[in-house]
Image (spheres, rainbow, N blue to C red):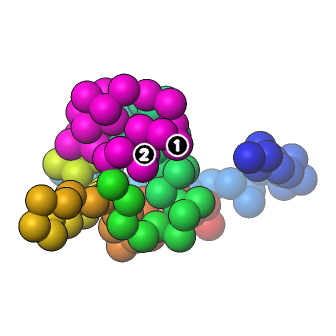
């Protein structure tokens, strides 16, 4: 994975507010909680693996192999991501998979979008 290219601002007026305007206290608390969940490197690695695979359902065992972490560690992080609403847990019989919930990420992108 390559690092995102960051372009310098030529005019500071181009970076003046968040895309949705000022956040209310409740919105700030909600987004801070989501960003706290995302601030864990292992969770970002798991999310990047899910996204690289097209955001489709992936099992814990598959993720364990992809990210090189133990099954209990992956399960712990998947639970945190699912409880936060960032992932969807799908049970089919004895099989459990997880997939990205893109609508919440679209919301986070909107909050961070600079006008």
Pointer 1: what residue?
66
Q: Residue furthest front?
A: 94
Classify mark 1: residues with Cα within 10 Å, few (<14), some (14-19) or many (20+): few
Tag on residue 11? none
Residue at horizontal 42 percent and vertical 70 percent from the top: 56
Pointer 2: what residue?
63
Q: Is residue 33 visible?
A: no
Residue 96 x %, y % = 20, 58
Residue 63 x %, y % = 42, 45
Q: Quadrant of residue 43?
A: top left
The magenta segment is 60-80
Query: In screen coordinates, is 37 left or right of 66?
Result: left
Q: Are marks 1 and 2 in contact (CB under 8 Å)?
A: yes
Q: Nearer the viewer, residue 8 or 87?
A: 87
Query: In screen coordinates, is 3 left or right of 21?
Result: right
Q: Callout 1: helix, strand or loop?
A: helix
Residue at horizontal 19 percent and vertical 66 percent from the top: 90
Residue at horizontal 47 percent and vertical 57 percent from the top: 50
Q: Callout 2: helix, strand or loop?
A: helix
Query: In screen coordinates, is 22 left or right of 109?
Result: left
Tell me, yes or no, whether the highlighted magenta stretch contains residue 79: yes
Q: Main secondary structure of the magenta part?
A: helix
Tell me, yes or no, whether the highlighted magenta stretch contains residue 8: no
């Amino acid at each position: 994975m390559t690092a995102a290219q960051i372009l310098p601002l030529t005019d500071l007026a181009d970076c003046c507010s968040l895309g949705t305007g000022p956040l209310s206290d409740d919105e700030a608390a909600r987004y801070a909680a989501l960003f706290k969940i995302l601030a864990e490197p292992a969770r970002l690695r798991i999310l990047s693996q899910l996204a690289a695979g097209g955001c489709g359902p992936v099992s814990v065992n598959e993720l364990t192999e992809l990210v090189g972490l133990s099954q209990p560690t992956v399960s712990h992080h998947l639970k945190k991501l699912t409880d936060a609403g960032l992932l969807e847990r799908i049970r089919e019989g004895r099989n459990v998979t997880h997939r990205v919930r893109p609508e919440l990420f679209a919301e986070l992108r909107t909050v961070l979008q600079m006008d």
